[in-house]
Amino acid sequence: MELLVGRERELDQLTAFALAAQDRGGGLLLRGPAGIGKSFVLAALSDQARSHGFHQLTISGIQSEARLAFAGLHQLVRPVLDRATDLPPRQRDALLSAFGMTDVLAPDPYLIALAVLELLALTATRAPVLAIVDDAQWLDRPTADALAFVVRRLGDDRVAFVVCARDGYETPFDTLGLPVIELGPLDHERSAALLDQRAPHLDERLRARVLNLARGNPLALTELASARPQHGSQHGTGAEVAMTARLERAFTSRYVELPEAVRTLLLVAAAGDTNDLRELVVAADLLLPGTAADPDLWKPAVDAQLVTVWEHRVEFRHPLVRSAIYQGAGTAQRVAVHTALATSLEASPDRRVWHRAAATLGPDEDVAAEIEAAADRAEARGGQTVTLEALERSAVLTPDLGRRAERFLRAAELALELGDPEAATRLSRLAQADALSPRSRARLRLLSEMLSPSPSSTAGVAAKADELIDVADVLFAQGDADLALRFAHLAAQQTWVTDVGQELRSAVLATAERVAPSTTDPVLLSVYSLTDPIGHNKVLIARSGDLVPHDIDAHTAHLVATALNFAGAFALSAPFSSAAATTLRAEGRLRQLVVVSAQQAWSAFPPLDWAVAVPAADETLRLARETGQPLWEASALIVQAMLAGVRGEFDESAALVGAAEAIALPMGANAMLCGLQLTRGLAAIGASSYDEAYEQLHRLFDPHDPAYHHFQSAWALGDLAEAAAHTGNVEAARAHLDSFAQHAQTGESTWTQVALLYARPLLVDDDRAEAAFRGALHADLSTWPLYRARLLLGYGRWLRRQRRAAESRAPLRSAREAFDALGARAFAEQARAELRAAGERSQGAETHAWQRLSPQELQIAQLAADGLSNREIGTRLYLSHRTVASHLYRVYPKLGITTRVQLRPALEQLV
């Protein structure tokens, strides 16, 4: 372990981290340049962990395996895969499908990752687990994403992950916020000590030269000493030569001195995607008939310290040895080697095809078709990122222009589905439109429109929406109603972003109605909500009422929930988003779950259902960050800010709003900015800062303000009216109220309708105010309890100001009790202040369960109270069963209970 000289401190840090996993797991990132000694430190850590009884799992990324979906994951969990039988059936099937061991179709990558998390948690019940990931930069992307998912969720599981990656490479682990140990160069003293161990007989001149060239790199110290660099040699090129290139040349100089047969053997190993000696010999025998199987053939390479051979495995001394040998080979040599490897892998089509591709120098339909088939198999196993790479490679090798364009188009559509618009844009440009079929040209047009930014001017947006419905009409006339409706829907999205006027919105809706296959088609319902959620809320609500949430698929339920949310009909939206979430959780579709979870959080705000809103907003925030969806991250922050404002936590609310604004403003997401201003205004009203409230809220009605939205701004009408009534801006507020009221339909189902209902008593003259308050309080506001309580507060406040203090106490008392029950402390304090002014004192409010528990603890406690086991809860929330158990262990004393059966009454009493 000579390369450990000078690494004692880092090894102690790693050992301490690993030993901490005996109580609580986690992840750590080890970084450094090539040759800095990372692998040696990991080997020493492995020895330390073994002496403490750790169960060890190890994986090492190999560049040539990067196109094999879940190849690295299989290597990691293979020693414990026998325990997969203990996993829940859906998780077990997903994991085995990822490895091609079952025929389950297209499991979601997150479900596969959850299975790995649970498998590691099961293994850790016997002994703590140390998982070492070396050369993480070369893991296949599905493996890296799955392991990043696992590492993010480690906590109470006794699993320590040490992830090692080379400097200059990005990995999914970089964004997890893990502690990082950087291995830097050795200082002069330690460099000299290591060099003297490795080459004690160097004369002073060479010793000084090696120390100067190596610059503290341990591998360079040992290898350059062996190479004996001389003045003017290829190693003495100065600091401008990269250390990696210098080391590769050192290895290459040793490689070229070997016999030709040994060099061929090493090139086969370097090009191969395995370390299995037997597989490599089979391929090499095609190039070296009768001699490749001779074990002595490896001896010169072993003696040259390029490889080690043990237990039917061949391992390069360092990844740079592999790359030096492969990069140093000529094109003809590489083609011959890859051809031999492909021939030897007839029984492994997914590995074989990449060697065929590497041996193909020009377009070849047979190879292209074989790669496309490999892409299909990768997609069926949940390896979408590998699928995308395979589709692109297949397209590149396709000689027929039409087929090539189709393959590029398919790849572009998949890239957008995976949330990579840059790749989708690049691939869509490679799909030549004139080579596509008419329908595929329309698909390409749709994709291009989805990828292109909205025009900056209202006229530009209107022209674009007009073009889209023209295309929809043409497609419908050609018999393609499905694609026609998608174009109409995209046009509707444009009209939501920018106010293009009622005439064009009506034209878009008319097109959608004409091409939709049924009046309850979810896409059509979405168009209703996008083009005119205020004017068409009745038809939207009526048609969605014909659908049963749990009888429709998740995609349909999600579309209906979205439509109702845009209309502000949150009580009606909640069952659809709940149904969609249940299915998406079970299938592991976390990207889609983020959107649905955000809808659940928004739907739970109007009734102040903290038991749903708090955990849903928290989960949306975590998953949005994990899946790279910043818009929904902002949405979750807004809900959290609204909740904090209602609770009276004004500084917290302002901080959350600021974080959301930092995301939404650069994106030009005016609907989100509208929600931000509404949140600021509501918090200011809760703080009785009415001037500030009006300043924030009146921006929502200025068409030139970034926060203005031609429909959603109406949600702030009630708050604007309250702020206006306290600041002398009644006439301006009335004007805004009238402009929306003439277009809105009657009822109490949507936020706009309720905002209008709440606003009217606040803006009328005193001689009509009492009748207006009484009329509003007689409306059905059962799903809008915060507004009803605020009406009671407003009525009581008005009565007291009319010198009717005794009469004011009843509505003020009812308001205080409602606010207390709702947990709306900001408004409860206002009610208490008004009651004191009316001559009545009040006691403080009780603490709610959601105040005692963290959002995730509350979510877990609710599921446990519903009778779910720890494992079932873990499956729903993408946690291990041990983490669930630890959360419940902390929940019990917070609620003053000792058993699981006490959860339900405890939650019912306090929520």
Image (cartoon, helix red, strand yellow):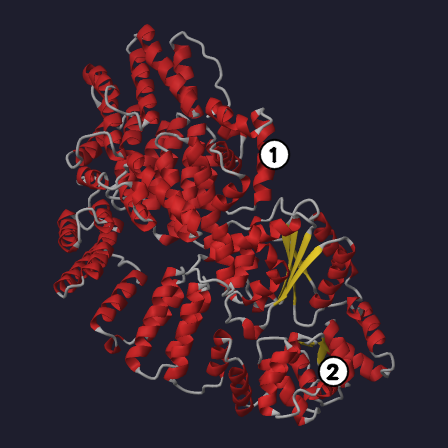
Question: Would residue 743 appear left or right of 906 to someone viewing this image?
Answer: left
Question: Would residue 587 appear left or right of 857 to someone viewing this image?
Answer: left
Tell me residue 30's x, y (percent): 66, 61
- Check the picture and name the quadrant holding the N terminus: bottom right
Does dot 2 land on a helix, a strand or a loop?
helix
Mark 2 and mark 1 in contact? Answer it, CB < 8 Å: no
Measured Cα–Cα span from mark 2 to mark 1 = 55 Å
Reply above or below: 806 against 202: above
Reply above or below: 850 against 82: above
The residue at the point 29 percent across, 15 percent down is: 798
Does dot 1 land on a helix, a strand or a loop?
helix
Where residue 405 sits, quadrant-wise, is: bottom left
What numbered label is drawn on residue 123?
A: none
Q: Residues within 10 Å of mark 2 (few under 14, many from 20)?
A: some
Reply above or below: 64 against 772: below
- Report the number of numbered marks: 2
Q: Is any atom of residue 676 visible in this view?
A: no
Tell me residue 811's x, y (percent): 33, 14
The residue at the point 26 percent across, 46 percent down is: 704
Tell me residue 423's x, y (percent): 40, 67
The residue at the point 60 percent across, 54 percent down is: 83
Find disc 2 in the rendering and name its residue: 302
The residue at the point 36 percent across, 29 percent down is: 607
Find disc 1 in the rendering and name its residue: 889
Where residue 766 sits, quadrant-wise, is: top left
Q: Name which residue type carries label 1.
A: Tyr
Q: Name which residue type carries label 2.
A: Val
Reply above or below: 306 against 129: below
Tell me residue 904's x, y (percent): 49, 27
Q: Residues within 10 Å of mark 1 (few under 14, many from 20)?
A: some
Q: Is any atom of residue 586 visible in this view?
A: yes
Front position in the image: 335 or 650: 335
